[in-house]
Image (cartoon, rainbow, N blue to C red):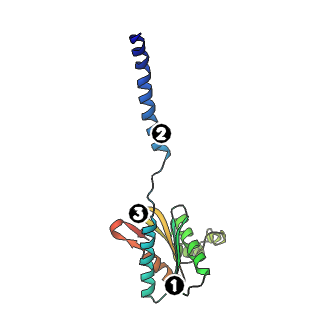
Amino acid sequence: MRLGRSIILSFFLPITAYGQTNNSQLAAGLLIKSDQLTLQTALHLTDLARTKAAALKKEVAIAILDSGGQIIMISRGDGVGFHNTEAARRKAFTAVSTKTTTLTLSRNARSNPDTENLASLPELLLLGGGVPIYHNGKVIGAIGIAGGGSPNNDDLIGKSARIIAADIIAQ
């Protein structure tokens, strides 16, 4: 009787062990690990951008989105028109979805007849101020700035959101 159990177990143990290893290897090929912005980091990036805006004597709306285009936070400075919150969100959405600053995208779209229709896509906003946020060379979100007085100011304010020590860079 013991010999029978030993023989049966000798067949099932390797199969069970193989199945566990195989599942781990399979999962590794099906899943992508990603870094995500925390709310604390979004708040810090917002503070950095708001400091740059203040140096330019501007109040702005700021949107921080994750890599999937979902809102982490939106902040509107005192006296900033409420339309700017939506503009900031759409600029950030455009930057994260295209992995390009909206100022660059806007200029490229206008200069190339093949891409000028990008401006007609409903969620994209081709105005300066949307900047992708990178970590270790990968886009992990975006910041959108609206209300800084010009596309160049909005772009400059957005690019000031960087935490060099943690390799979190808006560019």
Name the amino acid type tagged 2. Answer: Leu
Kindly identify which residue carries mark 2: 26
In-front residue for pair 107/166: 166
Kindly identify which residue carries mark 1: 148
Q: Is residue 31 above or below residue 94?
A: above
> In which quarter of the view is residue 134 placed?
bottom left
In the rendered image, the residue lying farthest to the left is: 165
In the rendered image, the residue lying farthest to the bottom is: 57
- Mark positioned earlier in the residue sequence (2 or 3): 2
Name the amino acid type tagged 3. Answer: His
Kindly identify which residue carries mark 3: 135
Percent x, y for residue 86?
A: 60, 75
Q: Secondary structure at mark 3?
A: strand
- Mark positioned earlier in the residue sequence (1 or 2): 2
In-front residue for pair 18/7: 7
Q: What's the residue at 39%, 11% (across, down)?
A: 3
- Mark positioned earlier in the residue sequence (3 or 1): 3
